[in-house]
Amino acid sequence: MANTPDRPLRFAMVGAGFWARYQLAAWKEVPEAECVAVCDRMRERAERLAMSLGVMRVYDDTARMLEQERVDFVDIVTDPPSHPELVRLVADHGIAVVCQKPLALSLEEAEALVDYCHSRGVRLIVHENWRWQVPIRALRRMLDGGVIGRPFYGEIRFCTSFPVFQNQPYLRTLERFALADVGVHLLDVARFFFGEADRLYCQTHRVDPDIRGEDVAIVVLRMNTTTVVCRMSFASRLSEERFPQTFCTIEGDRGSLELGPDYWIRTTTAEGTWARRFPPPSYPWVDPLYEVVQASMVPCNAHILHALRTGEPAETEAEDNLKTLRLVFAAYDSASRGQVRSLP
């Protein structure tokens, strides 16, 4: 799609559930994109979403929509079990695909989807917005600036008691929960900060007896010269809890960086400690309970659109996102075996 004429790229959205309304609102902030259709198996749900955000056409069958609409890409905002069938369907029409994470519920299926799209010459980009949060981008810039020198330890934490099952009740039924949900985000952020891992160890817990999967996981990774701990929990009650904020601590040989509550980043070196706040931008459509996450969809969408328009690689092309998924599934394997996993 490189060298696309200077016109908005037309797209269709598949899925009209909880996250879709915010995803579509975020696309509305990117003037170079135009949503022409919304599709959901529950037509009334698609109609409500389309009407609320000014989309003219509605479908309840994705195949029929693809036959009738001329679009440059399709944004899939559905639950993970539906991703493989939908990605293949869109790829069969030769249309670029943007898909929510996780791309699939097994590494083998995710790899097969990447191969499938590649064989058809179709772009497949994963909508991984976590790394586009304002404080996380700021932390990466500080790391790149070398203010704390060479990092040797990193910790990325997402620990909450927020009742996520109220808005997303299907999460209770997942055989794999914490790692497959927020763990995908945290491990992607770890890669964004520190590069690739060559070893990991994981332990998981199921604290809530009324869910099927794990609600707590701790992953320890060796990433180049840095030891990194990713800690995720939906069963924590902590004094500094700020759902859905991610906290980080990074120590280097010349100092440390700490991303703490309310978007404050503290830099400590031999000269002292400095603090600066990096809040997300405000949008009228954002749910205040999910502010930093939903606001990050806008720069993520703008980046993906630029990649589609120019042909330049996106940060989270599916081939790259597979590296994150390999960490996720290696973590499950490590937890089940109680062993350290070496990674290729």
Image (tube, rainbow, N blue to C red):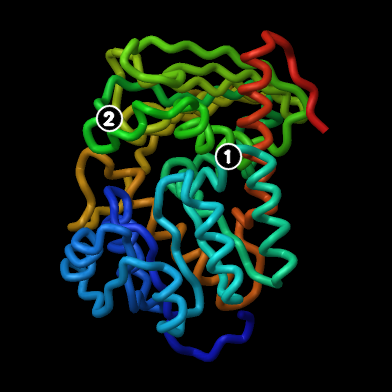
Q: Position of residue 17 (x, y in %)?
A: 29, 51
Q: Nearer the viewer, residue 248 or 255?
A: 248
Residue 169 lies, with reference to residue 213, above or below; the image says below
Q: Spot the residue most to the right.
A: 344
Label 1–label 2 contact, CB within 8 A: no
Which residue is rendered at x = 68% and y = 50% of the image? 320
Q: Which residue is mark 2?
A: 165
Q: Report the residue at 50% width, 49% height from top.
A: 128
Corner quadrant of residue 109: top right
Towards the viewer: 192 or 172: 172
User: Residues under labels 1 and 2: Cα distance?
Assistant: 23 Å
As helix, strand or loop, the secondary structure at mark 1 comes to helix
For the C terminus, the image quarter is: top right
Q: Earlier in the sequence, mark 1 or mark 2?
A: 2
Name the front one of labels 1 and 2.
2
Q: Is residue 201 left or right of residue 297?
A: right
Label 1 CA crowd tier, 10 Å (few <14, some 14–19, many 20+): many
> What amino acid is at disc 1?
Asp
Q: Nearer the viewer, residue 335 or 23?
A: 335
- Against 301, residue 145 (above or below) is above
Residue 175 in view: yes
Q: Is residue 336 left or right of residue 127?
A: right
Q: Position of residue 124 (x, y in %)?
A: 60, 62
Point out residue 212 in the picture as x, y percentages from the top left corner.
Answer: 41, 20
Badge 2 marks a residue whose secondary structure is helix
Can residue 253 be seen? Answer: no
Q: Which mark is residue 188?
A: 1
Residue 210, relative to residue 138: is it above or below?
A: above
Percent position of residue 256, x then y: 56, 25
Q: Residue at x 80, y 23 (%)?
A: 342
Image quarter (top left, top right, bottom left or bottom right) of the N terminus? bottom right
